[in-house]
Image (cartoon, helix red, strand yellow):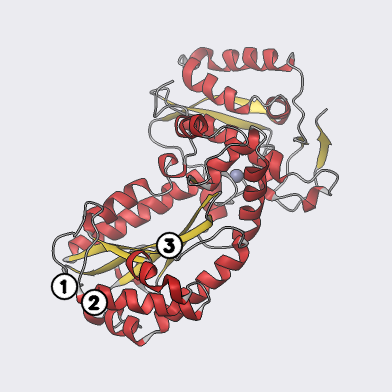
């Protein structure tokens, strides 16, 4: 298996692990997390389309239920972020064509283990609000259509989190700030990481430390350290790199090559304290039986529920002629085929439940991508594959099989727990 290939299959494998973790045994169907039903039933109609990219690098199903949860679902997250990434790169291109540039600001705070993520997110939100309301921020970054000292057109904020055993949760935001070139009055980067320095940046750092103190996220003894590391500003090249990787598997670790790399360092029960993981990396450890990873993933899904991943400042999309933002559910459900895709076969709702009950959905995608090269025989090949899967025993582990069609979340459906 080469690096770029079959990522969708890897993500489907992670989705299955997430479903196992999120499924509440004995609870009512409607009480289950929506991600439990993702790719487990048909949206409407009799059959799902089986699509394959011509170069064999990917396969997917159309017409299946999608959960649209950008935090909990590795499959929907990838789809949603693909579109968000296009928006970000359009914003960057528009900035350049207007003679502006994009800066990448990263905001964080000193973090310690044992503080619940929900509490940290609340306080972190409060700190960002206080920072944006400070006189220093308003003077430098502007407000309500006035661009401040840096000539800011607007910004896009992305919320992220990693977690480690020694230092606990590490929520942080990356802010793409569209502003005048050399707006911060900066010189060349001061270190290999690309950090910029200037008087305005120092002032913003000071305001950030004050905001953190007010929000209860920075003690007196942490002030100098937080001043040095709590906020950094990088230039256009770094901003472009960030956008290129936005939501991609290599950033999340939602691909087997990366997670396997980590697994070598810290196997079950012995994850090194100083290592940090993305939520989707936790899934692999949880699957291997690591209870710490299992509990952290559950805490993460609960704490991020309903939060926005990406927030555009008011008026920015309009000023760079980007249309209205589409919501997560809408993007996840989008079935528009890519030019290099062909529909090679269809499968029924029953076929789909045969695949999920045997934990073979990820493998099926790999099979289609790799083997269904001949469009004429693809349906027969798919049927043969399905006949084989029917002979396999059902997989257990609290995973469920969905029968019949449903609209993704609400409509009552028949379920049956796999043996
Ligand atoms: Zn999903």
> At which x and y percent is residue 408?
68, 48
What residue would you read off at disc 3? 173
Percent position (x, y) of residue 141? 30, 78
Q: Residue at x 52, y 55 (%)?
A: 167
Pick whichever of labels 2 and 3 is earlier in the sequence. Answer: 3
From this viewpoint, which residue is outermost toward the left?
A: 187
Label 2 within 8 A of ligand 1 by Cβ: no
In whole angstroms, how far apart are the C-alphas of marks 2 and 3?
20 Å
Q: CA distance from mark 2 to mark 1?
A: 7 Å
Does label 2 or label 1 sit earlier along the sequence?
Answer: 1
Determine whether 67 is above or below 232 in the image.
above
Q: Position of residue 405 (x, y in %)?
A: 73, 40
From the image, tell me which residue sits under label 2: 200
Query: Which image quadrant is residue 189 in?
Result: bottom left
Say if residue 12 shows up in the picture: yes
Residue linked to disc 1: 185
């Amino acid at each position: 298996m080469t690096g770029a290939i079959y990522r969708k299959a890897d993500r489907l494998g992670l989705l299955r692990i997430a479903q196992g973790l999120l499924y509440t045994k004995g609870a009512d169907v409607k009480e289950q997390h929506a991600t439990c039903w993702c790719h487990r039933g048909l949206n409407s109609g009799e059959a799902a389309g089986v699509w394959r990219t011509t170069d064999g690098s990917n396969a997917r199903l159309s017409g299946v239920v999608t959960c649209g949860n950008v935090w909990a679902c590795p499959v929907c997250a990838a789809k949603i972020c693909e579109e968000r990434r296009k928006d970000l790169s359009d914003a960057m291109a528009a900035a350049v064509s207007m003679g502006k540039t994009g800066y990448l600001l990263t905001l964080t705070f000193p973090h310690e283990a044992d503080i619940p993520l929900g509490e940290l997110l609340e306080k972190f939100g409060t700190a960002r609000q206080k920072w944006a309301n400070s006189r220093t921020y308003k003077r430098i970054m502007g407000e309500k259509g006035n661009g401040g000292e840096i000539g800011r057109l607007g910004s896009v904020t992305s919320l992220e989190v990693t977690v480690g055993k020694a230092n606990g949760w590490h929520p942080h935001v990356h802010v793409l700030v569209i502003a005048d070139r050399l707006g911060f009055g900066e010189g060349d980067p001061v270190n290999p990481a690309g950090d910029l320095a200037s008087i305005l940046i120092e002032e913003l750092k000071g305001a950030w430390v004050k905001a953190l103190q007010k929000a209860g996220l920075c003690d007196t003894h942490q002030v100098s350290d937080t001043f040095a590391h709590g906020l950094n500003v990088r230039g256009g090249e770094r901003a472009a790199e960030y956008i290129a990787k936005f939501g991609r598997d290599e950033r999340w670790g939602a691909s087997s090559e990366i997670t396997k790399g980590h697994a070598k360092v810290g196997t079950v029960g012995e994850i090194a304290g100083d290592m940090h993981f993305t939520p989707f990396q936790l899934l692999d450890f949880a699957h291997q039986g690591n209870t710490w990873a299992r509990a952290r993933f559950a805490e993460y899904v609960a704490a991020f529920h309903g939060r926005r991943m990406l927030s555009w400042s008011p008026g920015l999309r309009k000023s760079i002629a980007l249309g209205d933002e589409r919501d997560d559910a809408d993007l996840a459900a989008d079935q528009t085929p890519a030019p290099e895709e062909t529909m090679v076969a269809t499968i029924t709702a029953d076929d789909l439940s045969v695949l999920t009950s045997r934990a073979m959905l990820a493998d099926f995608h790999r099979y289609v991508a790799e083997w269904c090269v001949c469009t004429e025989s693809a349906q027969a090949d798919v049927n043969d594959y399905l006949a084989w899967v029917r002979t396999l025993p059902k997989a257990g582990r609290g995973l469920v099989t969905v029968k019949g069609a449903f609209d993704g979340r609400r409509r009552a459906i028949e379920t049956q727990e796999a043996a």
